[in-house]
């Protein structure tokens, strides 16, 4: 099966499965799991932060950050198209009882003036601005230049507002920018990244920050029922994800460009390879009467799993460890069949 729906579909590698079976474990709520302790130390070091805590998902990492940075009734500044706003079930309102000041730039970037304009100041009528949430890479696949992130972060810090970074795909962003992840993470007080997407670990994300922040987040994680016991079996593939799988993301980026260039040549397809910055390819289908359900059915019949429309006429493919150039050629042949 060729699965282009997301990089979340990646299978753990054989090495990961072996490491899971052999992991030394202990009760992590007591701090006794040596493999988890190793993963959290390694993750903190990679991000250039003092400490880190393992969480079950990127959503949980983001929500734990919001909860730990804010108080009930606070407001947070973030992008209208960000994952926290669009795809986390309104959890920040439900769990942390904060409201959103949404930045509505079509490219999804947050500029320093957005942070400055969103800041509420001390008027008694206003909620307190408690957090700026940045994202890189964006959920929409684009990468935010480091200078813009730095400037937005400084604008928040100058006003005493901390910054959280949703870095679900921070390693993809760093690769695309040609810099170390630490440089991106340095823009934020806390950073979340995922082990279970392009890095192929079966479960888990990391929240990193100062020791005091992570101590507080660890307590909030427990409150949410996220304290785990012999979780070294999940940390073991996470260590491989960090040490080895980060090194192969370039292949996914190359394959995404290859796919984008091939899509660009197809009749009824609009795709811009120059906008393909990580492992995500977005394209529009212009064929009159094109039926998304019939398209998905035809692809499935050819053992290709794809997502439906993300907005009218717009589609996304994601490359990852289980997608090869030959797979991409098969996908293109299948699309040609549909077009004809
Ligand atoms: C930018 C971004 N943030 C957060 C998440 C949430 O991760 P999870 O699906 O592990 O909750 C995702 C998931 O795709 C994402 O793309």
Image (spheres, helix red, strand yellow):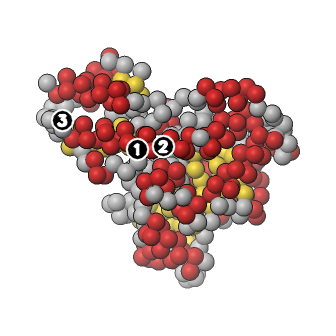
Q: Which residue is mark 1?
A: 253
Q: Earlier in the sequence, mark 3 or mark 2?
A: 2
Q: Position of residue 276 (x, y in %)?
A: 33, 48
Mark 1 C-beta to ligand 1 under 8 Å: no
Q: For the residues marked 2 and 1, what is the alpha-carbon distance in whole angstroms? A: 7 Å
Front-lying residue, 122 or 252: 252
**Residue 322 percent location from the top left of the image:** 46, 29
Is disc 1 placed on a helix, strand or loop?
helix
Quarter of the figure with residue 16: top right
Secondary structure under tag 3 reads loop
Between tags 1 and 3, which lies in front?
A: 1
Query: Which residue is label 2 attached to?
Result: 249
Query: 257 or 108: which is nearer to us?
Result: 257
Question: What is the spatial separation of the Cα atoms under label 1 and label 3, in whole angstroms?
Answer: 20 Å
**Residues at circles 2 and 1 in contact by the CB criterion of under 8 Å:** yes
Classify mark 3 as within 8 Å of ligand 1 or not, answering yes or no.
no
Decide which of tag 1 and tag 3 comes sooner along the chain. Answer: 1
Few, some or many residues within 10 Å of mark 3 (<14, 14–19, 20+): some
Image location (x, y in percent) of residue 187: 55, 67
Instruction: Give whichever of 303, 184 is nearer the camera.
Output: 184
What crowding class fits label 2: few (fewer than 14 Cα within 10 Å), some (14-19), or many (20 or more)? many
Residue at figure coordinates x 66%, y 35% from the top left: 237
């Amino acid at each position: 099966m060729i699965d282009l729906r997301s990089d979340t579909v990646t299978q753990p590698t054989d090495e990961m499965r072996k490491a899971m079976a052999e992991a030394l474990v202990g009760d992590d709520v007591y701090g006794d799991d040596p493999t988890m302790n190793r993963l959290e130390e390694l993750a903190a070091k990679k991000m250039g932060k003092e400490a880190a805590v393992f969480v079950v998902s990127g959503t949980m990492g983001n929500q734990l950050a919001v909860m730990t940075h804010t108080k009930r009734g606070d407001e947070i500044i973030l992008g209208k198209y960000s994952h926290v706003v669009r795809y986390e079930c309104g959890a920040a309102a439900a769990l942390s009882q904060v409201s959103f000041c949404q930045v509505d730039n079509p490219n999804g970037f947050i500029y320093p003036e957005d942070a400055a304009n969103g800041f509420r100041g001390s008027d008694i009528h206003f909620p307190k601005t408690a957090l700026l949430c940045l994202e890189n890479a964006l959920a929409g696949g684009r990468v935010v230049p480091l200078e813009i992130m730095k400037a937005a972060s400084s604008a928040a810090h100058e006003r005493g507002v901390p910054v959280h970074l949703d870095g679900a795909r921070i390693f993809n962003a760093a690769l695309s920018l040609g810099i170390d992840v630490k440089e991106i993470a340095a823009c934020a007080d806390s950073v979340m990244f995922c082990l279970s997407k392009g890095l192929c670990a079966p479960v888990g994300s990391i929240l990193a920050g100062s020791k005091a922040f992570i101590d507080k987040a660890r307590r909030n994680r427990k409150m949410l029922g996220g304290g785990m016991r012999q979780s070294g079996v999940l940390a073991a593939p996470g260590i491989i994800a960090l040490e080895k799988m980060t090194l192969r993301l370039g292949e996914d980026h190359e394959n995404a460009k290859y796919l984008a260039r091939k899509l660009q040549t197809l009749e009824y397809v609009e795709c811009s390879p120059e906008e393909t910055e990580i492992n995500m390819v977005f394209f529009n289908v212009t064929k009159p009467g094109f039926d998304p359900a019939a398209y998905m059915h035809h692809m499935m019949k050819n053992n290709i799993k794809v997502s439906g429309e993300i907005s009218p006429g717009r589609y996304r493919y994601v490359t990852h460890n289980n997608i090869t150039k030959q797979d991409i050629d098969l996908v293109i042949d299948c699309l040609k069949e549909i077009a004809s």
